[in-house]
Amino acid sequence: MTAPNDPWKDLTPPSAASAINARRVDENNPWGFFWARAMDGKCLLVLQHKTESSPAKKLPSLKGVEVAVTEGYSQHNLMLVFRLLDSRQRDIFHQLCIDIVAAGAPACTESEAVALAVARTWRWHHLLRGGTGGRLSEDEQKGLIGELLVLERHLLPCLSPADCLAAWRGPLGAPKDFEVGRICIEAKARRGAATPFVLITSEHQLDGEGCDFLFLHVADLSHAPEGADQTFTVSDAARRVHDRLSLDNAAADKYESLLAAAGFRWEDDYSDFKWMEGPCRIYGVSDGFPRVTANEIATGVSNVRYSVSLIECERFVVEARTMNEAITGYAP
């Protein structure tokens, strides 16, 4: 039985295999989201976008839903297509689509709208696979806290809330976690008691191409023992930044979208997983810094993962004010 609010019920399948029959999701939404039907009758959600806005990373997979990028119907246009394969899941697919559209709506640019749509789909991928009830894993919590510390202590004191959030690119899958003009910051968090290494997950993270300054911010975070003092959860870290943004409604909304793209939800309970913070260090990444960059690897090799020994990086340590002054100097 078709639900009364089913957006596909009045869309008939097109007569040509290469065509779709589509209707815009919301005329007030600035991005190209469309409800659509394919020739085989499958229900689709389509996000039409320019070639340069297309997602660069692997797309998520969901049981019963195909996610793909296909050619559009005009030059230089592509389509991010969500296709329902199992018609019995139409109601759930509808809710997924509504959530994807809502995630993309606050974006400031088309490429950001595409990235937010993909990030929200990854959230569903994670949730439907089970695990810890959809909560962030230990490593995901640690990574998000590392980025929130940079926002709280370095960007918010130097930039407007809107510019801070425009600079936060980590949840959108960008090569660097923060971009302020030609200043880039990569945020890492590591266990304080562990061997002093940080994991670098691509050849682009510490590549300074296109940057005037590139900084590596490393926070020491450890799982807090029972009864320890000065502990906090990932929710506490997110709340501190939220409180700094609460007077700017547009910035607060953007912040919520970025948290969601990172996989964080306020309703998840993290009270059983508390953290203790140790020292934070900032490194100026420049000539001689131990790293692998894109122009150093063979053609056809990508997604390089490697570890950097922080002991070998001591001579690159800089004061926090050095990074803050650089940020302020490049403020929009």
Image: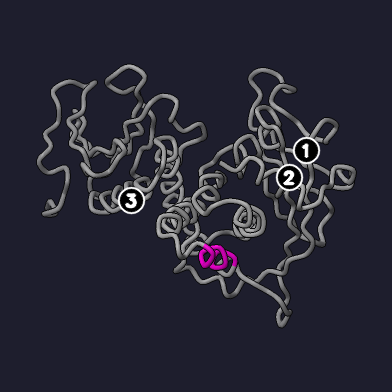
**Cα separation between marks 2 and 1:** 7 Å
- Residue 141 — which label? none
- On the picture, is 272 further left or further right than 86? right
Residue under the image location 44 percent in, 69 percent down: 267
Q: Which residues are magenta?
A: 237-244
Q: Are marks 2 and 1 in contact (CB under 8 Å)?
A: yes
User: Which residue sits at x=59%, y=65%?
Assistant: 237
Question: What is the chief secondary structure element of the magenta stretch?
Answer: helix
The residue to which callout 2 is attached is 216
First along the sequence among labels 3 and 2: 3
Q: Amino acid at mark 3?
A: Ala
Badge 1 element: loop
Disc 3 secondary structure class: helix
Q: Position of residue 59 (x, y in %)?
A: 46, 37
Task: Tell me the quarter of the picture where residue 148 sits.
Answer: bottom right
Mark found first going from the N terminus, 2 or 1: 2
Q: Position of residue 209 (x, y in %)?
A: 68, 27
Q: Which residue is mark 3?
A: 102
- Residue type (three-letter) at the residue carrying disc 1: Val
Within the magenta stretch, is there residue 238?
yes
Give the Cα separation between the discs numbered 1 and 3. 37 Å
Direction from residue 55 to residue 180 in the image, left or right: right
